[in-house]
Amino acid sequence: MSEEIKVTTKSPSENDLVQRNDKDIIQTEIVSGDNKKTHRKRVRMSLTHRRMIVGYVFILPWLIGFFMFYVRSVILAGRFSMSLMDMDANAGGYTLKFIGLENYIKAFREHATFKQVLTTSLTNMLVDVPLITFFSLFMAILLNKKFKGRAVFRAIFFLPIILNSGAISEMMALAQAMMNGGITPTASELSSSAGSGVLAFDIDYLISMFMNLGLPARFVNYLSSAVSRINEIISASGVQIIIFIAALQSIPGSMYEVAKIEGATGYETFWKVTFPMVMPHIITNVVYTIVDSFTDSAVVDLAHDTMFKTFNWGLGSAFTIISTIVTCAILGIVVFLLQKRTFYYN
Amino acid sequence: MAKKQLTPVERALQKNRLIKKREKRLNRSVAGNTLLFVIMAICGVFMVLPLVMIVNNALKPLDELYQFPPRIFVRNPTFENFSDLFTLMNDTWVPFSRYILNTIIITGGGMIGHVLCASLASYPLAKHEFPGKKILFAFVVMSMMFSWQVTQIPQYMIISWLGINNTYLALVLPLWAYGMGLYLMKQFMEQIPDSLMESARLDGANEWQIFWRIMMPNVKPAWLTLAIFQFQQAWGQTGGLFLRNEELKPLQYSLQQISAGGIARAGAAAAVTFVIAAVPITFFLICQSNILETMTTSGMKD
C-alpha cells in the first residue's frame, strides 16, 4: 500500500491527479466498512504485493535452511568467541563463561602467529585475485574461439574443480603419505628431467637480472611469487573460466558486427565491447575468488588447529570472526570500487 | 573536396593491395592461433597432470609405486590394484552395495535439493524487488566465508538440536541451504532480460510458470554447473561427524577405510583414488556438452 503511494509521490507535478485519487482511495478505505476495505485492498495490492509475496514464497525453503544451519552457526561461533568454553567429558556437554572481548584481545596481543598468518593470507589473496581473474578471462576468451578440439580443452580446464575437491585431494594426500612421495614429486621430477635439457634456467638469475634492470623489488617479488604459484592459480580458476565463458556467450553477436562495420580493431573491440559486457561477471568472479581463496587459506587452518588441536574453542572462533570480518571488508571495498565502473546492460 | 577519380590500373593496384593485406592478416591470425594453442596446451598440461598421475598410479604394480625417484608413467601396467580392491570390498562389515546405496541417497538428495532450493530462491533475488533483499544477499555472501572446518562444532550442535543426528538428513539438509549455489544462480538470472519475463506475463503466465518455463531453461548451463559442484561436494562427504551407524555410511568412508590400511594397501589405495576421481569426472562428461555449449543468449536481443 505505502509503496504505491511512494511511487506516485515521486513525481508530484505530473501525477497530481493520480495522487489525489490515491488519497481518496485511502480515505474511502478507512471510512468504508470492513468488507469493502478488504476487497479494495486485494484488488489494489495485486500487482506489486502479490509478486512480492510470491518472491518470499520462492525464497522460503532456502531461507529456512539458511537461518537454521548457517545463520545459527555464525551466531553460535560469535558466542563461542566471547566466552571461555569448558568441556565436561563425564557429564557431557559444555559450559560457557562469558568473558567479553578477551579472546579478541588475546588474538591480537598474545597469540604468536595470528596477526602474521592473517596478513600473509590476506596479501596472498590480494595477489591471487587479479591474477586469477585475468587469467580466467584470458582463458575463457581463448576457449570461446572456434577451433578443433575445443570440447576437449574445455573439459580439461574444468578438471581442477573436480580434482581439487575435498575427497580427491584428501585421497591423494593419503596416498602420497603412504607412498612417501608418489604424487607431489612430479614437479621435481619434471624439473630434474628438464634440468638436463635446454629448458633449464635459473630463476634466481632471472630475478637478479630484473633487479639489475632497476625494476622495483616489490614488483619483481610480485611477479616471481605469481610465477611460482602458477599451478595454484591455474587450478583455482576453473569455475571462473566457466562463468566467463557463459558471460562471453551471452554477448549479442550483433554488437561485434556493429563494431566491425564501424571499423574497430580487435583491441578496441575487446575494450569497448567484450570488457564492458563481461564486467558484471568480473565482479561475480572476484567475489567468488576471494571467498574461495579465503576458505582454504592459512587463517582458516590456524583457526581449525586452534579449535581441534589445542582445544581452545573460544580463541579459534575469535580467529574465524576476525578474519571473516576483515575479508568481508575487503570484499565490500573491492565490489564497491568495481561496481562504480560497471556498466549493466539490462 | 572532390573525390579523386581512379584509373583502372590504380583501382586494380588498390585491389591487389587489399588482397595482400587480407592475406597478411590471415597469416598473422594463423600464427596467433598457434601461439594461443601452445599457451593453452601448456596450461592444459598443468591441469591434466594430476589426472594422469592418478590413472597411472592405479595401474602401477606395488614396486613401481614405491620407486624412487617416482615416475609419472607406468611401465608394467597391471589390474592387480583393482582386483585387490574388489577382494577388500567383499569382506567389509556391511554389504558393499549398502555403501553404494547410501552414497546415491546422500549425493542425489544433496544435489537435487540444493539446485532446486538455490534456483527457487535466486529467482526473486535476481528479478524481484522486496524489502530486505540487499541485506539478505550480503548475508549470503558472508555466510560463504565460514568454511565447514570452522563451523563444525556449531553445525554439530544444530544437527543434534534438530534431532537428525545419525540420519541421512544430517548430511543432506545443510547442503540445501548452502550459499554458493544461490550466489551463482542469482548472477546468471540477472542476465536474463526483463522483457522476456514481461512478455511471458502478458501472455498470462504466473510466477511459477515463468520460473519453470522461462528462467530455468535459460539458465540451464548455470544449474548444470551447480549440479556438478554439488555432486562432487556431496560425493566427497565421509559423514564421519554425523553418522555413527555403519549401515548409513557412504562409499567414501569405506573406501577411505580400505586405503588407510598402511603400506600393504598402497595399491588398493591408488585404485581407490582412481575410483573416487572417476565418478565425478564421468558425471561431468555427461553434463559437459550441455554446460559449455548451450549457453546461448536468452532468446532475445534487445
Image (spheres, rainbow, N blue to C red):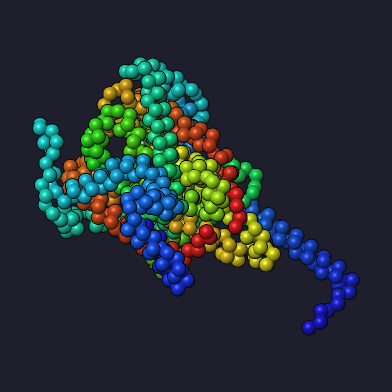
| Residue B27 locus on image (x, y percent) | 71, 57
Question: Which quarter of the figure has residue A181?
Answer: top left
Query: Residue drawn at (58%, 55%), measured in percent from left and top?
Result: A251
Residue A200 appears in the rendering: no
A219 to B109, vertically: above or below: below
| Residue A63 locus on image (x, y percent) | 34, 44
Quadrant assignment for the C terminus of chain B:
bottom right
Q: Nearer the viewer, residue A140 or A99?
A: A99
Question: Which quarter of the figure has residue A149?
Answer: top right
In this view, the residue farthest toward the right is B8
| Residue B123 locus on image (x, y percent) | 45, 48
Query: Residue drawn at (29%, 58%), measured in percent from left and top?
Result: A326
Total tally of numbered discs in the picture: 0
In the picture, measured across the screen, residue A195 lies left or right of residue B243, that is right
| Residue A234 locus on image (x, y percent) | 47, 49
Question: Which quarter of the figure has residue B256?
Answer: top left
In the picture, measured across the screen, residue B197 lies left or right of residue A208, that is right
Q: Nearer the viewer, residue B83 or A304?
A: A304
Residue B301 appears in the rendering: yes
Query: Residue drawn at (86%, 68%), measured in percent from left and top?
Result: B12
B85 to B279, vertically: above or below: above
Query: Residue drawn at (54%, 39%), measured in percent from left and top?
Result: B288
In the picture, measured across the screen, residue B166 lies left or right of residue B18, that is left
Quadrant assignment for the N terminus of chain B:
bottom right
Q: Nearer the viewer, residue B207 or A2?
A: A2
